[in-house]
Image (cartoon, rainbow, N blue to C red):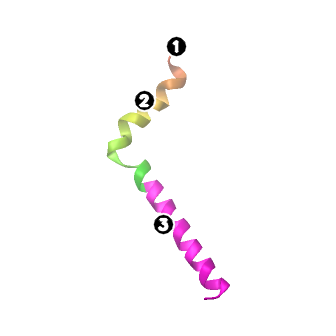
Amino acid sequence: MDINTLRIAATLACFATFIGIVIWAWSRRNVSRFEEAARLPFEQD
């Protein structure tokens, strides 16, 4: 196994992680939590 194989593996792992985060962020289960978090700066005590 040479350095290029390790670089390819690291790139694919990072890409898979990125895709996982995108899927998690756009998941319908998280919409209500994200909308609530988006309104936090505008709420007054």
Which quadrant would residue 2 be assigned to in this image? bottom right
Please give the name of the residue rendered at 54% of the width and 24% of the height, measured from the top-left corner. 41
In the image, what residue occupies the spot 44% across and 48% down? 25
Residue that badge 1 annotates: 44
Relative to 8, is 39 on the left or the right?
A: left
Q: Quadrant of residue 20 in the image?
A: bottom left
Provide the residue span drawn in magenta.
Answer: 1-22
Helix, strand or loop at mark 1: loop
- Secondary structure of the residue carrying numbered label 2: helix
Residue type at mark 3: give it: Ala
Up-down relation of residue 22 to residue 34 (above or below): below
On-image quarter of the N terminus = bottom right
Tell me where residue 29 sits by quadrant: top left
Q: Main secondary structure of the magenta part?
A: helix
Marks 2 and 3 in Cβ contact (< 8 Å): no
Alpha carbons under labels 1 and 2: distance apart: 14 Å
- Name the mark nearer the viewer: 2 or 3: 3
Dot 1 amino acid type? Gln
Q: Disc 3 marks which residue?
A: 16
What percent of the width, then of the height, locates residue 45?
51, 11
- Residue at which label 2 appears: 36
Query: Considering only order in the chain, which callout, 3 or 2, is on the residue closer to the N terminus?
Result: 3
Callout 1 crowding tier (Cα within 10 Å): few <14, some 14–19, many ≥20: few
Label 3: how many Cα within 10 Å (few below 14, some 14–19, many 20+):
few
